[in-house]
Amino acid sequence: MTTIEVYFDFRSPYAYFASHRIRRGLVRTDIAFAWRPVSIDILLNLQAGREAFAPYLDPLSAPKRAHLIADVRRLASYYDLPLKPTRPPRPNSIPALCLATLLPEGQRAQFVCAVFDALWQKQQDIADAAVLARCLTQAGGPADTLMRSFEVAARAELADRTEQAYARGVFGVPTFVCGDEIFFGNDRLDLLLWTLEQRRVAVSSQGRLRT
């Protein structure tokens, strides 16, 4: 079984697209996805040499932001996915990311899907405890993790994991890591799957040559 680590932040529409492509059975059954929550704001601060939780600075120019909005709308139509403007316009994803960090792998995957849909389809505030509680119930996660996700210790854990990811070479989301190879962006998921298929074919061909 090949494991692909998926580094994500709920606030990224491209990570939302990737989550749905994975859910739709895009990949072979011998591939497992491990969801790794990180904060895109912390990643940007680290790249700028700032403290992890320094105040947000918009890194996009006006033309690039306009292109991003148009690109996201086109991709939503291309993937045939519901997509609504988030509320609030710039969601606070930290509590949801902290909660995802606290959950075990299996429940985390279900929780991730529930939060992505709550944010990008239902226009719900994913920093709201009631919204997170519903997503947690859908994932079958332990109720006591909800309050812990709002604690300072959970924020510190998220920051630490994000810093570890950055040291590993992760600089944005979504990022897919397979072994020591890094593939950045929703569109690079196709390249990663192609790479794995080429390896499988090569190994199969070598096996036939030996027999």
Image (cartoon, grey):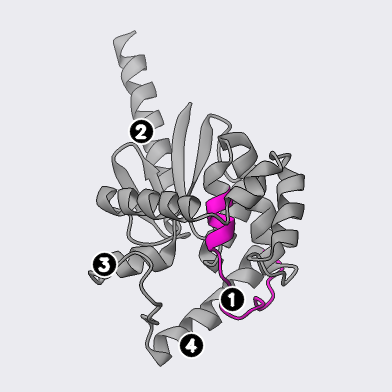
Closer to the chain start, of discs 4 and 1, is: 4
Mark 2, Cα crowd under 10 Å, few <14 / some 14-19 / many 20+, is: few
Measuring 37% from the left and 37% from the top, which residue is drawn there? 198
Residue range in magenta is: 80-99
- Residue 202, picture quadrant: top left
Measured as percent of width and height from the top left, residue 73 is found at 60, 77
Image x and y of residue 15, in percent: 53, 60
Q: Amino acid at mark 3?
A: Gln
Q: Is residue 57 visible?
A: yes
Left or right: 74 with respect to 158? right
Q: Nearer the viewer, mark 4 or mark 2?
A: 4
Q: Is residue 202 above or below residue 129?
A: above
Q: Position of residue 124 (x, y in %)?
A: 72, 69
- Magenta span contains residue 81: yes
Instruction: Determine whether label 1 and label 3 are within 8 Å by CB.
Output: no
Instruction: Name the residue: 49% across, 51% down.
Output: 154
Q: Which mark is residue 47?
A: 3
Label 3 SS? helix
Three-letter amino acid code of the residue under disc 1? Arg
Q: Give the residue at mark 4.
A: 66
Q: Earlier in the sequence, mark 3 or mark 4?
A: 3
Residue at horizontal 70 percent and vertical 60 percent from the top? 129
Q: Nearer the viewer, residue 207 or 11?
A: 11
